[in-house]
Amino acid sequence: MPTSAKKPRQKSGRLAGRTAAKPVAKKQASPTTSKPQTLRVPAKGPLTLKQARALVMGTSEPQHAVGAADAVRRRSSRAAAKAAVAPLPVPATPQTVETARRLLVLQQQDELKLRTNDYKATLTLLQRRGVKGLAEKEPPAKAETAAVSKRRGTRSLTALTVAPGPLRVFAEGDSWFDYPVPLFGGGVIPRLEERLGVPILNLAQAGDETRFMLGVKQRRLISRHLREGCPDGQPWDLMLFSGGGNDLVDEPLALWLRPFDATKSPKQLLNQSRFGTALAMVKAAYEDLIELRNQLSPSTHLAFHGYDFAIPDGRGVCHLGPWLKPAFDLHGYNLATSTAVVKEMLTQFAAMLTVLAKRPGVTFIKTQGILPPVKTSWHSELHPSKSGFNQVANQFHTQIKALFAGRVLP
C-alpha cells in the first residue's frame, strides 16, 4: 500500500568537540545518525542472519572482503540517490519534472540491484557456513518428499529434493512489504527475515498496484526472477506477494461508494457492480502471477495475504495520504460507517484470495482480524503500527515454518 518515496540513509555525523575546561556530557546519537555498531562474528561455524549481514555490509570483525567492497559501493550509490531526489527548481518546468522522473526510475533500479547483490552475498555466506539454529539434515527420501509435495500442493519435486539449507525466498509487493526502515523498522519483510533467520530478496516498492506489478515492465522482472531462480542457481522455494490494496483505494474509491444512507448495510453502500469490476482486475493480476509461476518455476510456492481492517481516520504518512477518508467525506460518511465499509471491501478481497489459494502451490496467509480494531494498531490509515507489523510478521512466520519445517527458524 502507498507510502513515501524511499529516502537515502543519512550519514553519521561527529559529535561536537569538547573543551578541557568544561567537559560536555556525551550525547546519545539518534538512530538515524549513529554509526553502525561493529558486530563481532565468529571466524568459523554457523552464522545468524544479522552476523551474515554485518559481514556483507563491512560492519563486522573480522571484515569480510565482499563486505568491504559492498560497503563502498553502497555509500556511493546512496550519494547518487540523494542527488536524484533533490528538490526541483521553482518554478518547475516540464523538462525538470521529466528529468526528476527519470532520475527516480534510475534510483529505483539501482536500489533493486543493491538489494539483489546484498541478498546474493548474504545467502552465499549462510549456505557456506550454515544458519545458526538450523540443523543440517540429509535430503528426504523420494517417497517422503512426494508426500510432503502432495501436502503442499506443489507440481514438481525440484525445490524439495535439492540440498537442504536456508530457504530461498523473494518478495514482490507494496508498502506492507516496503515501509520506511529509518525510525520505524520497515514493513513485513525485514521483521519476517528476523523470525525466519534467512534473507529475503525484496523487490517490493511502496505504492505499487497489481495492474503495474503484472503489467509489462514489472511482469518481465518477475518472469526473469522466476525463470532464472535464486542467485545460487536453484529454483526459488517461496515467493511472497502483497498487492491489491492500492488498486482499490485513494481517488478511485469515490467510484465504488454510494451516498451515505444510515438505513443501508455496508455491503449495500458499496456500488457492487463497480467494486466487483475493480476487484476482478486485481484477481486477473493474481491469476496471471499464478500462471507465470506454473510456466516458469512450478516448484515455487506462492503466498498471498489480505491486509487487515484499516481505519479511515485521515492519517497519512510522510506528507502522503490520506487514501480513504477523503472519498468517504465526499459521500457524507461518519467514521463508524466508513470503517464498516472498508471491512466489507477487504472481506470480499480475502474471499477472492481464498478461492485462488485452492490452486496447487498457493497459500493464503490470513492476516485480517489479528490487529485490535483501535487507532493505536495503525501508523496511518493503511499501515500497521510497529507492534502491528510485528503481529503480521508473526502470522507469516507461523505459516511459512509449517510449509517448510527445518528450513527456517522455529
Image (cartoon, rainbow, N blue to C red):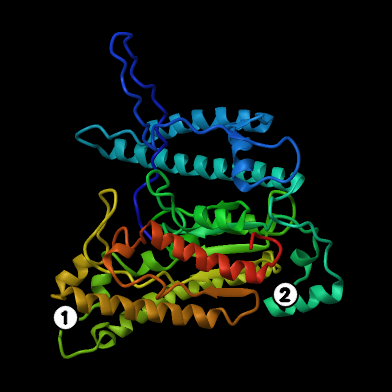
**In the rendered structure, which amino acid carries the disc numbered 1?**
Pro
In this rendering, would 140 be left or right of 184? right
Identify the image quadrant of residue 381: bottom left
Q: Quadrant of the N terminus?
A: bottom left
Q: Which mark is residue 372?
A: none
Tell me the residue at 31%/16% (across/down).
23
Question: What is the x, y in percent for residue 338?
Answer: 23, 75
Q: Which residue is most to the bottom?
A: 263
Question: What is the x, y in percent for residue 21?
Answer: 29, 8
Q: Which mark is residue 155?
A: 2
Asked whether 209 or 368 is in front, the reply is 368
Query: Quick check: 351 above or below 5?
Result: below
Asked whether the beta carbons under mark 2 and mark 1 sit within 8 Å of each other, the answer is no
Question: What is the x, y in percent for residue 58?
Answer: 60, 31
Tell me the residue at 56%/53% (across/down).
194
- Find numbered disc 1 in the image and state the secondary structure of the residue it sits on: loop
Of the numbered discs 2 and 1, the one sitting upstream in the chain is 2
Tell me the residue at 62%/47% (across/down).
49
Q: Quadrant of the C terminus?
A: bottom right
Question: Mark 1 Cα within 10 Å, few/some/many (few <14, many 20+)?
Answer: some
Q: How many marks?
A: 2
**In the rendered structure, which amino acid carries the disc numbered 2?**
Arg
Residue position marked by numbered label 1 in the rendering? 259
Asked whether 78 or 315 is in front, the reply is 315
For the residues labelled 2 and 1, the Cα–Cα distance comes to: 48 Å
